[in-house]
Image (cartoon, rainbow, N blue to C red):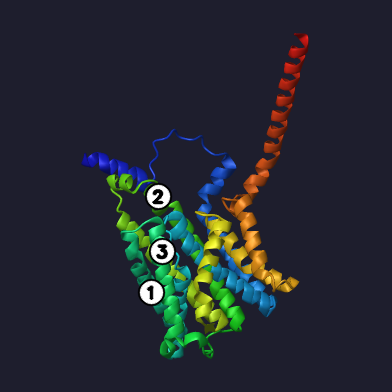
Amino acid sequence: MTQLVGTAESAVVEGADTAPVAPPPPAPLRGLQQHATALRLGGSLLAVILGLAFASMAGSYYVFVGAQFFAFVIVTLSLNLLFGYGAQIVIAQGAVVGLGAYSFAIMVRHGVHPIPAAVAAVLFTMLSSLVVALPALRLEGLYLGIATLAFQFGLSGLFAAWDAVTGGQQGLALPQVQGAHGPFNNDQFWFVVSGIGALLVLLGTGRFVRGSGGRAMAALRQSVYAAQTLGLRPVRWRMLIFAISGAMSGLAGVLLAGQIAFVSPASYSTDRTLLFFLAVIVGGVRSVAGSVLGALVAVVLPQLLALLGYTDNESLIFAALMIVALITLPDGLVTLPRRLAALPSRLASLRGSRRAAFADNGSQEVGHDGK
Protein backbone atom coordinates (compact mmCIF):
# COMPACT_ATOMS: atom_id res chain seq x y z
CA MET A 1 0.00 0.00 0.00
CA THR A 2 2.86 2.38 0.85
CA GLN A 3 4.46 1.73 -2.48
CA LEU A 4 1.17 2.43 -4.26
CA VAL A 5 0.71 5.78 -2.47
CA GLY A 6 4.30 6.78 -3.19
CA THR A 7 3.84 5.98 -6.87
CA ALA A 8 0.61 8.00 -7.03
CA GLU A 9 2.20 10.96 -5.24
CA SER A 10 5.05 11.04 -7.69
CA ALA A 11 2.53 11.01 -10.51
CA VAL A 12 0.93 14.20 -9.15
CA VAL A 13 3.89 16.09 -7.72
CA GLU A 14 6.66 15.07 -10.09
CA GLY A 15 4.42 15.22 -13.14
CA ALA A 16 4.33 11.58 -14.18
CA ASP A 17 1.62 11.03 -16.76
CA THR A 18 -0.11 7.74 -17.46
CA ALA A 19 -1.92 9.08 -20.54
CA PRO A 20 -0.72 8.10 -24.02
CA VAL A 21 2.43 9.92 -24.99
CA ALA A 22 1.76 12.78 -27.39
CA PRO A 23 3.71 12.92 -30.64
CA PRO A 24 6.92 14.94 -30.42
CA PRO A 25 6.70 18.59 -31.43
CA PRO A 26 8.19 19.78 -34.72
CA ALA A 27 11.92 20.31 -34.88
CA PRO A 28 11.77 24.15 -34.57
CA LEU A 29 9.62 23.87 -31.45
CA ARG A 30 11.95 21.28 -29.95
CA GLY A 31 14.83 23.67 -30.47
CA LEU A 32 12.90 26.44 -28.68
CA GLN A 33 12.04 24.13 -25.79
CA GLN A 34 15.67 23.10 -25.37
CA HIS A 35 16.74 26.74 -25.12
CA ALA A 36 13.75 27.97 -23.09
CA THR A 37 15.89 29.14 -20.15
CA ALA A 38 18.27 31.05 -22.40
CA LEU A 39 15.33 32.63 -24.21
CA ARG A 40 13.74 33.73 -20.92
CA LEU A 41 16.99 35.25 -19.71
CA GLY A 42 17.54 36.98 -23.04
CA GLY A 43 14.00 38.30 -23.05
CA SER A 44 14.39 39.50 -19.47
CA LEU A 45 17.61 41.32 -20.33
CA LEU A 46 15.96 42.92 -23.35
CA ALA A 47 13.00 44.01 -21.21
CA VAL A 48 15.37 45.64 -18.69
CA ILE A 49 17.23 47.48 -21.47
CA LEU A 50 14.00 48.71 -23.05
CA GLY A 51 12.72 49.77 -19.64
CA LEU A 52 15.84 51.80 -18.94
CA ALA A 53 15.58 53.43 -22.35
CA PHE A 54 11.92 54.27 -21.76
CA ALA A 55 12.66 55.70 -18.31
CA SER A 56 15.37 57.96 -19.70
CA MET A 57 13.37 59.27 -22.68
CA ALA A 58 9.71 59.34 -21.63
CA GLY A 59 8.07 62.11 -19.67
CA SER A 60 7.53 61.86 -15.94
CA TYR A 61 3.79 61.20 -16.34
CA TYR A 62 4.29 58.11 -18.53
CA VAL A 63 7.11 56.90 -16.30
CA PHE A 64 4.80 57.19 -13.28
CA VAL A 65 1.98 55.29 -15.03
CA GLY A 66 4.45 52.60 -16.08
CA ALA A 67 5.65 52.19 -12.50
CA GLN A 68 2.05 51.89 -11.31
CA PHE A 69 1.44 49.21 -13.94
CA PHE A 70 4.42 47.16 -12.72
CA ALA A 71 3.17 47.32 -9.13
CA PHE A 72 -0.33 46.29 -10.22
CA VAL A 73 1.13 43.33 -12.12
CA ILE A 74 2.66 42.08 -8.88
CA VAL A 75 -0.61 42.51 -6.95
CA THR A 76 -2.67 40.83 -9.67
CA LEU A 77 -0.27 37.89 -9.80
CA SER A 78 -0.39 37.52 -6.02
CA LEU A 79 -4.19 37.46 -6.02
CA ASN A 80 -4.32 35.12 -9.01
CA LEU A 81 -2.04 32.74 -7.15
CA LEU A 82 -4.55 32.63 -4.29
CA PHE A 83 -7.86 32.90 -6.10
CA GLY A 84 -7.03 31.21 -9.40
CA TYR A 85 -4.45 28.54 -8.69
CA GLY A 86 -5.21 28.02 -5.00
CA ALA A 87 -9.02 28.36 -5.25
CA GLN A 88 -9.03 30.53 -2.11
CA ILE A 89 -11.60 33.35 -2.06
CA VAL A 90 -9.65 36.08 -0.25
CA ILE A 91 -11.24 39.55 -0.19
CA ALA A 92 -8.48 41.35 1.68
CA GLN A 93 -5.79 42.03 -0.91
CA GLY A 94 -6.06 45.79 -0.58
CA ALA A 95 -5.44 45.59 3.16
CA VAL A 96 -2.49 43.20 2.71
CA VAL A 97 -0.91 45.57 0.19
CA GLY A 98 -1.57 48.39 2.64
CA LEU A 99 0.34 46.52 5.35
CA GLY A 100 3.42 46.52 3.16
CA ALA A 101 2.99 50.18 2.25
CA TYR A 102 2.35 51.43 5.78
CA SER A 103 5.12 49.36 7.39
CA PHE A 104 7.59 50.64 4.79
CA ALA A 105 6.46 54.25 5.24
CA ILE A 106 6.62 54.10 9.05
CA MET A 107 10.14 52.67 9.08
CA VAL A 108 11.43 55.18 6.53
CA ARG A 109 9.91 58.05 8.53
CA HIS A 110 11.80 56.77 11.59
CA GLY A 111 15.14 56.93 9.81
CA VAL A 112 15.51 53.38 8.51
CA HIS A 113 17.23 53.14 5.13
CA PRO A 114 14.76 52.26 2.31
CA ILE A 115 16.44 48.94 1.42
CA PRO A 116 16.25 47.25 4.85
CA ALA A 117 12.88 48.91 5.38
CA ALA A 118 11.58 47.33 2.18
CA VAL A 119 12.91 43.89 3.14
CA ALA A 120 11.38 44.15 6.62
CA ALA A 121 8.05 45.32 5.18
CA VAL A 122 7.90 42.36 2.78
CA LEU A 123 8.70 39.89 5.58
CA PHE A 124 6.16 41.51 7.92
CA THR A 125 3.45 41.33 5.27
CA MET A 126 4.29 37.69 4.54
CA LEU A 127 3.94 36.79 8.23
CA SER A 128 0.70 38.76 8.48
CA SER A 129 -0.67 36.82 5.51
CA LEU A 130 -0.18 33.63 7.47
CA VAL A 131 -2.60 35.08 10.02
CA VAL A 132 -5.10 35.58 7.18
CA ALA A 133 -4.43 31.97 6.18
CA LEU A 134 -5.63 30.59 9.52
CA PRO A 135 -9.34 30.79 8.56
CA ALA A 136 -8.48 29.00 5.31
CA LEU A 137 -7.58 25.90 7.31
CA ARG A 138 -11.19 25.51 8.46
CA LEU A 139 -13.28 27.58 6.04
CA GLU A 140 -13.80 27.33 2.30
CA GLY A 141 -15.59 29.19 -0.46
CA LEU A 142 -17.93 32.00 0.51
CA TYR A 143 -17.30 31.56 4.25
CA LEU A 144 -13.59 32.13 3.73
CA GLY A 145 -14.37 35.19 1.65
CA ILE A 146 -16.53 36.65 4.43
CA ALA A 147 -13.83 35.98 7.05
CA THR A 148 -11.14 37.67 4.98
CA LEU A 149 -13.48 40.56 4.17
CA ALA A 150 -13.76 41.14 7.92
CA PHE A 151 -9.94 41.28 8.00
CA GLN A 152 -10.07 43.89 5.22
CA PHE A 153 -12.58 46.03 7.15
CA GLY A 154 -10.56 45.72 10.35
CA LEU A 155 -7.28 46.80 8.79
CA SER A 156 -8.95 49.64 6.86
CA GLY A 157 -10.40 50.92 10.12
CA LEU A 158 -7.01 50.59 11.80
CA PHE A 159 -5.29 52.58 9.06
CA ALA A 160 -7.87 55.35 9.44
CA ALA A 161 -8.12 55.46 13.24
CA TRP A 162 -4.56 54.97 14.55
CA ASP A 163 -3.50 58.59 14.21
CA ALA A 164 -0.31 58.28 16.26
CA VAL A 165 1.18 55.61 13.96
CA THR A 166 -0.59 55.67 10.59
CA GLY A 167 -1.48 59.37 10.47
CA GLY A 168 -5.21 58.61 10.38
CA GLN A 169 -7.21 59.96 7.47
CA GLN A 170 -4.43 62.43 6.69
CA GLY A 171 -2.01 59.63 5.84
CA LEU A 172 1.79 59.67 5.95
CA ALA A 173 4.25 61.42 3.65
CA LEU A 174 7.55 59.67 2.93
CA PRO A 175 10.72 61.77 3.24
CA GLN A 176 13.18 61.88 0.38
CA VAL A 177 16.44 60.06 1.08
CA GLN A 178 19.38 61.98 -0.36
CA GLY A 179 21.52 59.97 -2.78
CA ALA A 180 19.22 56.93 -2.74
CA HIS A 181 18.15 57.32 -6.38
CA GLY A 182 21.58 57.26 -7.97
CA PRO A 183 21.57 58.73 -11.50
CA PHE A 184 17.74 58.67 -11.70
CA ASN A 185 15.15 61.09 -10.48
CA ASN A 186 12.40 59.81 -8.16
CA ASP A 187 9.97 58.70 -10.92
CA GLN A 188 12.68 57.01 -12.98
CA PHE A 189 14.11 55.23 -9.95
CA TRP A 190 10.80 53.69 -8.95
CA PHE A 191 10.00 52.82 -12.56
CA VAL A 192 13.23 50.82 -12.86
CA VAL A 193 12.88 49.18 -9.44
CA SER A 194 9.20 48.33 -10.05
CA GLY A 195 9.97 46.94 -13.50
CA ILE A 196 12.75 44.69 -12.20
CA GLY A 197 10.53 43.55 -9.33
CA ALA A 198 7.62 42.75 -11.68
CA LEU A 199 9.95 40.87 -14.02
CA LEU A 200 11.35 38.72 -11.21
CA VAL A 201 7.86 38.02 -9.86
CA LEU A 202 6.64 37.06 -13.34
CA LEU A 203 9.49 34.63 -13.86
CA GLY A 204 9.15 33.16 -10.37
CA THR A 205 5.38 32.77 -10.57
CA GLY A 206 5.57 31.19 -13.99
CA ARG A 207 8.15 28.70 -12.78
CA PHE A 208 6.07 27.87 -9.71
CA VAL A 209 2.78 27.25 -11.52
CA ARG A 210 4.48 25.20 -14.24
CA GLY A 211 6.28 23.02 -11.71
CA SER A 212 5.26 20.74 -8.88
CA GLY A 213 3.54 23.62 -7.07
CA GLY A 214 1.11 24.17 -9.92
CA ARG A 215 0.40 20.44 -10.20
CA ALA A 216 -0.21 20.18 -6.45
CA MET A 217 -2.59 23.15 -6.61
CA ALA A 218 -4.46 21.53 -9.51
CA ALA A 219 -4.83 18.30 -7.52
CA LEU A 220 -6.14 20.18 -4.49
CA ARG A 221 -8.63 22.12 -6.64
CA GLN A 222 -10.05 18.88 -8.02
CA SER A 223 -10.46 17.11 -4.68
CA VAL A 224 -8.79 17.75 -1.35
CA TYR A 225 -9.57 14.26 -0.09
CA ALA A 226 -8.21 12.58 -3.21
CA ALA A 227 -5.06 14.70 -2.98
CA GLN A 228 -4.62 13.65 0.64
CA THR A 229 -4.77 10.00 -0.34
CA LEU A 230 -1.94 10.71 -2.79
CA GLY A 231 0.23 12.06 -0.01
CA LEU A 232 -0.28 15.81 -0.51
CA ARG A 233 -0.69 18.01 2.56
CA PRO A 234 -3.38 20.66 1.97
CA VAL A 235 -2.43 22.68 5.07
CA ARG A 236 1.19 22.97 4.02
CA TRP A 237 0.35 24.00 0.47
CA ARG A 238 -2.28 26.53 1.55
CA MET A 239 0.09 28.14 4.03
CA LEU A 240 2.77 28.23 1.33
CA ILE A 241 0.66 30.05 -1.25
CA PHE A 242 -0.61 32.51 1.37
CA ALA A 243 3.00 33.24 2.38
CA ILE A 244 4.15 33.68 -1.24
CA SER A 245 1.15 35.84 -2.08
CA GLY A 246 1.70 37.92 1.05
CA ALA A 247 5.34 38.56 0.19
CA MET A 248 4.35 39.61 -3.34
CA SER A 249 1.63 41.92 -2.00
CA GLY A 250 4.07 43.44 0.49
CA LEU A 251 6.53 44.14 -2.32
CA ALA A 252 3.76 45.82 -4.32
CA GLY A 253 2.83 47.92 -1.28
CA VAL A 254 6.44 49.08 -0.90
CA LEU A 255 6.59 50.04 -4.58
CA LEU A 256 3.26 51.91 -4.50
CA ALA A 257 4.27 53.81 -1.36
CA GLY A 258 7.62 54.76 -2.87
CA GLN A 259 6.12 55.86 -6.18
CA ILE A 260 3.63 58.25 -4.62
CA ALA A 261 5.77 59.04 -1.53
CA PHE A 262 2.50 59.00 0.41
CA VAL A 263 0.17 56.44 2.01
CA SER A 264 -3.45 56.91 3.06
CA PRO A 265 -6.36 54.62 4.01
CA ALA A 266 -8.23 55.43 0.79
CA SER A 267 -5.45 53.85 -1.28
CA TYR A 268 -5.95 50.42 0.34
CA SER A 269 -9.68 50.32 0.95
CA THR A 270 -12.25 47.71 -0.03
CA ASP A 271 -12.72 49.48 -3.37
CA ARG A 272 -9.06 48.83 -4.19
CA THR A 273 -9.51 45.16 -3.23
CA LEU A 274 -12.43 44.85 -5.62
CA LEU A 275 -10.37 46.55 -8.34
CA PHE A 276 -7.67 43.90 -7.90
CA PHE A 277 -10.31 41.18 -8.16
CA LEU A 278 -11.70 42.68 -11.35
CA ALA A 279 -8.19 42.82 -12.82
CA VAL A 280 -7.76 39.09 -12.20
CA ILE A 281 -11.16 38.13 -13.60
CA VAL A 282 -11.02 40.38 -16.66
CA GLY A 283 -7.44 39.42 -17.49
CA GLY A 284 -7.88 35.69 -16.99
CA VAL A 285 -8.02 33.42 -13.96
CA ARG A 286 -5.13 30.94 -13.60
CA SER A 287 -3.10 32.75 -16.24
CA VAL A 288 0.16 34.64 -15.74
CA ALA A 289 -0.34 36.51 -19.01
CA GLY A 290 -3.94 37.24 -17.99
CA SER A 291 -2.68 38.88 -14.81
CA VAL A 292 -0.54 41.22 -16.89
CA LEU A 293 -3.48 42.09 -19.14
CA GLY A 294 -5.77 42.66 -16.16
CA ALA A 295 -3.22 44.98 -14.54
CA LEU A 296 -2.89 46.86 -17.81
CA VAL A 297 -6.64 47.42 -17.98
CA ALA A 298 -6.86 48.43 -14.32
CA VAL A 299 -4.08 51.03 -14.65
CA VAL A 300 -4.17 52.32 -18.20
CA LEU A 301 -7.91 52.59 -18.79
CA PRO A 302 -8.57 55.20 -16.06
CA GLN A 303 -5.59 57.19 -17.31
CA LEU A 304 -6.91 57.12 -20.88
CA LEU A 305 -10.34 58.22 -19.73
CA ALA A 306 -8.75 61.11 -17.84
CA LEU A 307 -6.80 62.18 -20.92
CA LEU A 308 -9.99 62.07 -23.01
CA GLY A 309 -11.84 64.21 -20.48
CA TYR A 310 -14.28 61.58 -19.20
CA THR A 311 -13.29 61.90 -15.55
CA ASP A 312 -16.86 62.66 -14.44
CA ASN A 313 -18.16 59.35 -15.80
CA GLU A 314 -14.98 57.34 -15.25
CA SER A 315 -16.49 54.86 -12.77
CA LEU A 316 -19.54 54.28 -14.94
CA ILE A 317 -17.51 53.69 -18.10
CA PHE A 318 -15.03 51.48 -16.28
CA ALA A 319 -17.82 49.36 -14.78
CA ALA A 320 -19.63 49.09 -18.13
CA LEU A 321 -16.48 47.93 -19.92
CA MET A 322 -15.80 45.41 -17.17
CA ILE A 323 -19.31 43.96 -17.50
CA VAL A 324 -19.01 43.75 -21.28
CA ALA A 325 -15.67 41.97 -20.95
CA LEU A 326 -17.09 39.50 -18.43
CA ILE A 327 -20.06 38.69 -20.69
CA THR A 328 -18.16 38.43 -23.97
CA LEU A 329 -14.95 36.91 -22.57
CA PRO A 330 -15.82 34.87 -19.47
CA ASP A 331 -12.34 33.30 -19.50
CA GLY A 332 -10.61 36.68 -19.65
CA LEU A 333 -8.84 38.82 -22.21
CA VAL A 334 -6.06 36.25 -22.44
CA THR A 335 -8.38 34.03 -24.51
CA LEU A 336 -9.17 36.78 -27.03
CA PRO A 337 -6.46 35.79 -29.60
CA ARG A 338 -7.59 32.17 -29.51
CA ARG A 339 -11.22 33.17 -29.97
CA LEU A 340 -10.36 35.45 -32.88
CA ALA A 341 -8.29 32.70 -34.52
CA ALA A 342 -11.19 30.25 -34.18
CA LEU A 343 -13.76 32.75 -35.51
CA PRO A 344 -13.38 31.88 -39.25
CA SER A 345 -13.85 28.16 -38.62
CA ARG A 346 -16.88 28.86 -36.43
CA LEU A 347 -18.43 31.06 -39.11
CA ALA A 348 -17.76 28.39 -41.75
CA SER A 349 -19.32 25.74 -39.53
CA LEU A 350 -22.33 27.97 -38.95
CA ARG A 351 -22.77 28.55 -42.69
CA GLY A 352 -22.46 24.82 -43.34
CA SER A 353 -25.10 23.97 -40.75
CA ARG A 354 -27.45 26.55 -42.26
CA ARG A 355 -26.95 25.11 -45.75
CA ALA A 356 -27.64 21.64 -44.41
CA ALA A 357 -30.79 22.86 -42.70
CA PHE A 358 -32.00 24.56 -45.90
CA ALA A 359 -31.25 21.42 -47.91
CA ASP A 360 -33.21 19.26 -45.46
CA ASN A 361 -36.16 21.65 -45.58
CA GLY A 362 -36.06 21.66 -49.38
CA SER A 363 -36.00 17.89 -49.62
CA GLN A 364 -38.92 17.61 -47.20
CA GLU A 365 -40.93 20.11 -49.26
CA VAL A 366 -40.18 18.18 -52.49
CA GLY A 367 -41.20 14.91 -50.86
CA HIS A 368 -44.41 16.46 -49.59
CA ASP A 369 -45.28 17.86 -53.07
CA GLY A 370 -44.58 14.44 -54.63
CA LYS A 371 -47.11 12.84 -52.34
Q: Any mark on residue 123, and which?
A: 1
Residue 87 quadrant: bottom left
**Amino acid, disc 1:** Leu
Of residues 268 and 248, the one drawn nearer to the viewer in this rendering = 268
Q: Residue at x 61, y 80 (%)?
A: 187
Q: Quadrant of the N terminus?
A: top left
Of residues 205 and 349, the one drawn nearer to the viewer in this rendering = 349
Is 16 above or below relative to 197? above
Tell me if residue 199 can be seen.
no
**Picture coordinates of residue 355, whole percent (x, y):** 74, 27
Q: Residue at x 52, y 48 (%)?
A: 33
Q: Which residue is mark 2?
A: 221
Of residues 4 and 233, the one drawn nearer to the viewer in this rendering = 233
Instruction: Find numbered disc 3 in the image and state the secondary structure of the residue it sits on.
Output: helix
Mark 1 Cα within 10 Å, few/some/many (few <14, many 20+)? some
**Picture coordinates of residue 10, whole percent (x, y):** 32, 45
Residue 192 quadrant: bottom right
Of residues 109 and 184, the one drawn nearer to the viewer in this rendering = 109
Q: Which residue is mark 3?
A: 146
Earlier-in-chain disc, 1 versus 3 = 1
Q: Which label sits in the foreground, 1 or 2?
A: 2
Q: Quadrant of the C terminus?
A: top right
Instruction: Find numbered disc 1 in the image and state the secondary structure of the residue it sits on.
Output: helix
Left or right: 134 as drawn, with respect to 316: left
Mark 1–mark 3 distance (CA, rounded to whole Å): 25 Å
